[in-house]
Amino acid sequence: MASLWVNCVKKRLKKPRDSRVHQDVVIITGDAKEFMEGYINQVQEKEHYYFRPPVCPRQDYYYYGCDRGNHSAGKSNGEASKTRANSCKAYISFKVITDTGISGAIIQKMQHHTGHDENNSKEKNRIHPDLHSLVKIWLQLGWSTSEVLIKSYDWAQQNGHVDKKDSRFYLTPNDIRLLKKTLRGVGDSDSVSVDHLVSTELRDNICFYQPLHNEQPFILVVQTPFQKQLLEENPHPMVFMDASYKGITAYGYAFYALLLINKTGRGVPFAYFILSKETTTTVSLCLQKLQLSNPSFYLRSVMMDRDLRVLNAMKSIFPNAKLLLCWFHVLQAVTRWLVKADGGHLTPEQRNVVIHAMASMKACLTVLYLYF
Ligand SMILES: [Zn+2]
């Protein structure tokens, strides 16, 4: 019966376009998640290639990318002895299916690892599993990066590992920071629960959703029915827009709120953007999707900080809108510049003059545009 089922599923499979991709169909008797974890662990132990926590871009589809799948940036040039980011495209994916009462998975394996070779000991090797689990515990206890660094150094010494260049036993602060990020960051469960919530309970509040997948950034445009109606009542508003990083700091994501002034003179949010990557393209995409789902919406003017990415996104989607810099942000930038070491080396008296000049500028009624 089982083999019949497997053959039946296999027959219906499309041949992968990439000839390096190997397909298989297996029956799952227990919990699908446990099965996938077990499978990945086995490959890791056997082949010494490691995979990242899964992402779930589609329902019941789980993608485990190679641990060295990130693009390298900075000095390392992607050299495997200096970085773990080798743009490796190897992966294992599972599509969990249930048909005629039987559960199974279609497994796709692309095991052509590029840019690295886990058997080469000179490569920047992953942290020893024992130390890895210890560091995880220490981080969960809320220890700081430097505390973990000292503790892991002691551990390596006590366990007789003397070569301080051995990255399996001697961590860098950056190793710990990265671990912290993966620990608190978008783990399997987070990404899966967001995916689930967006497509079920919160469906009516989502204007646009792009799941996190490989190089594709996470984008969420949120607008509740109430907010939609608010925007319908004020289709050409003056918009106030700003980003915050608190609240979702653990993920390193940006949270944008867009506000308009309602009839009683209060600022009310009418949409939110959550972005894993802030670029002119991602912000433009959010604005575009918001405009598409609110056809009568066209903003008259927008008040924001001097973030060039947002500024350029605004210009491209709403070319006729007036762009205003928020006074608070202008003053904040001036004040920050003044207290910085390279802030013109002004004396306290001179600083006062600058602040006074800024204050009187605010009282100006006319505007002189300067183009650079
Ligand atoms: Zn790889």
Image (cartoon, rainbow, N blue to C red):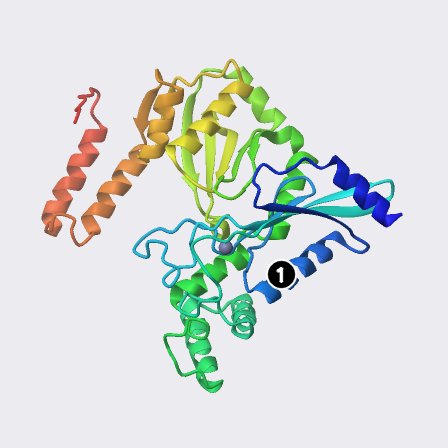
Q: Residue at x 42, y 19 (%)?
A: 299
The percent coordinates of residue 28 (x first, y second) are 78, 52
Specify the farthest residue to the right.
1
Q: Which residue is mark 1?
A: 43
Task: Give the left or right position of residue 1, taking residue 192 as reference.
Answer: right
Give the quadrant of the C terminus: top left
Instruction: Evaluate whether residue 47 shows in this view.
Output: yes
Query: Could you tell me residue 286's position as x and y percent?
Result: 48, 29
Q: Quadrant of residue 171?
A: bottom left
- Name the residue: 57% across, 33% down: 209
Q: Is residue 259 visible?
A: no
Q: Secondary structure at mark 1?
A: helix
What type is the residue that disc 1 sits on? Val
Residue beneath the point at 27% across and 36% down: 330
Residue located at (46% from left, 28% from top): 285
Residue 270 in the image: state x and y as whole percent.
52, 27
Location of residue 128 with respect to 291 vertically, above or below: below
Q: Position of residue 144 (x, y in %)?
A: 44, 68
Tell whether 89 sits left or right of 302.
Answer: right
In the image, 135 versus 14, the foreground residue is 14
Q: Is residue 216 above or below residue 182?
A: above
As drawn, 46 above or below 109: below
The one of 345 and 126 positioned closer to us in this rendering? 126
Query: How many labels were placed on the picture?
Result: 1
Q: Residues within 10 Å of mark 1 (few under 14, many from 20)?
A: some
